[in-house]
Image (tube, rainbow, N blue to C red):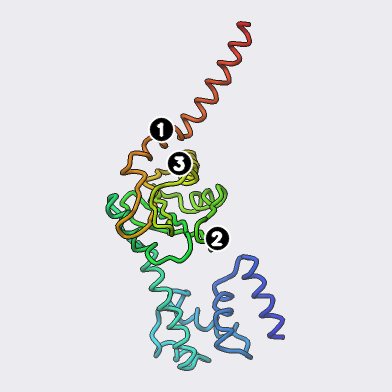
């Protein structure tokens, strides 16, 4: 009976179905109780501490006072609580990037020693705090492909004030390629559509060889040419200019 119930619970978790707090706690306790129905223990814990947060922040002594919870299970839950505390602390602000020197130093620390080409997107709030890092890699030495759909998912999910894009060149040459320019233009347009600022695109070749689209002035040129307004306005102007010319003929 327990095996069938556990399978159903795992399916709900796998399919992102809405799970109650006690059901999530049940699943967490599956490994602590391999052959026991964890539902009663989950309810006892939530009754004793009021919430998942209360369960995972409780002392070992208080956890063992709950019926059915021994020291090993209490330590198991405490480990989950400590992981959650650290994740919350880290996600509250991975770093604060106030200027382009900080962008560069952060990129160097992130991309130093990589053995494949990777692309990272740093989502920043108005205070320069990094809220999320998205990394993409094809596992190849000289190529990483990131489609517009993936960029859009990051922008929609995070709704950042601005983003910094960074990738590495394993060749040791930090100069941007034509593909790098095209990608910068594409991501600038996507940012413009979503009211997000593209703050910089950095190319890391070594600690002393980092190219900045912003500091080089290239980002200003790309931003002016590939904003949503400029692209749409250009197409509108061309459309109605051609229409007027046809009418004059």
Point out the frontmost of discs 2 and 1. 2
> What residue sits 31% from the left and 60% below the top?
207
Q: Quadrant of the N terminus?
A: bottom right
Q: Which quarter of the figure has residue 93?
A: bottom left
Is 7 placed above or below 172 here? below
- Depth check, front residue: 168 or 66: 168
Q: Is residue 103 left or right of residue 30?
A: left
Q: Earlier in the sequence, mark 2 or mark 1?
A: 2
Secondary-structure class at tag 2: loop
> What residue sits 58% from the left and 11% below the top?
244
Distance of mark 3 from mark 1, alpha carbons?
A: 10 Å
Is 163 placed above or below 41 here? above
Q: Position of residue 167 (x, y in %)?
A: 43, 55
Q: Earlier in the sequence, mark 3 or mark 1?
A: 3
Is 117 placed above or below 195 here? below
Q: Earlier in the sequence, mark 3 or mark 2?
A: 2
Q: Position of residue 26 (x, y in %)?
A: 58, 80
The residue that disc 1 covers is 224
How crowded is the residue under tag 3: few (<14 C-alpha within 10 Å), some, or many (20+)? many
- Depth check, front residue: 152 or 49: 152
The residue that disc 3 covers is 188
Residue 189 is labelled as none
Q: Quadrant of the C terminus?
A: top right
Q: Position of residue 164 (x, y in %)?
A: 39, 51
Distance of mark 3 from mark 2, alpha carbons?
A: 22 Å
How crowded is the residue under tag 1: few (<14 C-alpha within 10 Å), some, or many (20+)? few
Q: Position of residue 115 (x, y in %)?
A: 46, 66
The residue that disc 2 covers is 138
């Amino acid at each position: 009976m327990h095996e069938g119930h556990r399978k159903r619970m795992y399916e709900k978790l796998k399919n992102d179905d809405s799970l109650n707090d006690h059901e999530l706690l049940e699943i967490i306790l599956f490994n602590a109780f391999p052959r026991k129905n964890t539902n009663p223990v989950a309810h006892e814990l939530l009754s004793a501490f009021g919430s998942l947060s209360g369960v995972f922040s409780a002392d070992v002594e208080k956890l063992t006072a709950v019926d059915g919870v021994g020291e090993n299970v209490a330590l198991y839950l405490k480990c989950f609580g400590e992981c959650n505390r650290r994740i919350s602390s880290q996600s509250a602000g991975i770093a604060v990037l106030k200027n382009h020197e900080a962008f560069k130093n952060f990129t160097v620390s992130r991309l130093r020693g990589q053995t494949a080409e990777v692309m990272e997107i740093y989502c920043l709030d108005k205070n320069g705090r990094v809220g999320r890092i998205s990394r993409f890699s094809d596992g190849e030495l000289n190529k990483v492909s990131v489609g517009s759909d993936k960029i859009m998912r990051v922008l929609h999910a995070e709704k950042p004030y601005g983003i910094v894009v960074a990738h590495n060149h394993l060749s040791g040459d930090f100069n941007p390629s034509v593909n790098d320019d095209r990608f910068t233009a594409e991501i600038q347009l996507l940012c413009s559509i979503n009211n997000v600022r593209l703050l910089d695109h950095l190319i890391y070749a070594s600690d002393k060889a980092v190219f900045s689209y912003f500091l080089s002035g290239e980002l200003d040129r790309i931003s002016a040419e590939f904003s949503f307004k400029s692209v749409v306005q250009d197409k509108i102007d061309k459309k109605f200019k051609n229409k007027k010319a046809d009418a004059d003929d």
